[in-house]
Image (cartoon, rainbow, N blue to C red):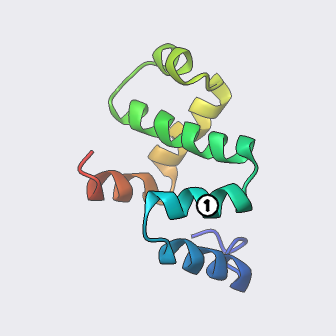
Amino acid sequence: MNKKIKTEAVDHLFQAVLALKSIDECYSFFEDVCTVNELLSLSQRYEVAKMLREKKTYLEIAEQTGASTATISRVNRSLNYGNDGYDMIFERLGL
């Protein structure tokens, strides 16, 4: 875990996210908290991670998601050297 982000304010944000009970509640909350571009960027990274896990090429991923190769590379680095957050979620979702 990155100690730079471990703050009381981030803890409060994560507690709020954990309190959400439906996709509709997520839309309401995240539309208030994030800009449209921030939310689309987060969802794009998640889609990139899924596709990398499926062994898709950078070209396929870029074409299907519109992500830059820099973004794809960053997500790939997280998958390979990060905190295993993506893998934890993929496992829980059966992906």
In the picture, measured across the screen, residue 60 lies left or right of residue 13, that is left
* Disc 1: CA contacts within 10 A as few (<14), some (14-19) or many (>=20): few
Q: In the image shown, does 2 or 93 lie closer to the viewer?
A: 93
In the image, what residue occupies the spot 50% across and 19% down? 64
Residue that lies at the very extreme toward the bottom in this rendered image:
8
**Quadrant placement of the N terminus:** bottom right
- Mark 1 lies on residue: 28
Amino acid carrying mark 1 in the image: Ser
Q: Is residue 89 above or below residue 2?
A: above
- Residue at horizontal 58%, vertical 77%? 16
Q: Position of residue 63 (x, y in %)?
A: 54, 14
Q: Which residue is pictured at 51% across the width and 37% down the height?
A: 76
- What x and y, as percent, mark residue 42? 61, 46
In the displayed orientation, state which residue is furthest to the left.
Answer: 94
Q: Nearer the viewer, residue 19 or 53?
A: 19
Count the marks: how many? 1
Question: In which quadrant of the rendered view does residue 52 lie?
Answer: top left
- Give the quadrant of the C terminus: top left
x then y, percent, for residue 18: 49, 75
Q: Locate residue 66 relative to residue 56 in the image: left or right.
A: right
Q: Which residue is drawn at the image coordinates 46% and 57% (left, top)?
A: 23
Going by the image, does 2 lie left or right of 93?
right
Q: Which element carries disc 1, helix, strand or loop?
A: helix
Compared to 14, does 32 lie above or below?
Answer: above
Instruction: Relative to 33, say whether 21 is above or below.
Output: below
Indicate the position of residue 59 as horizontal and vertical percent values: 51, 13
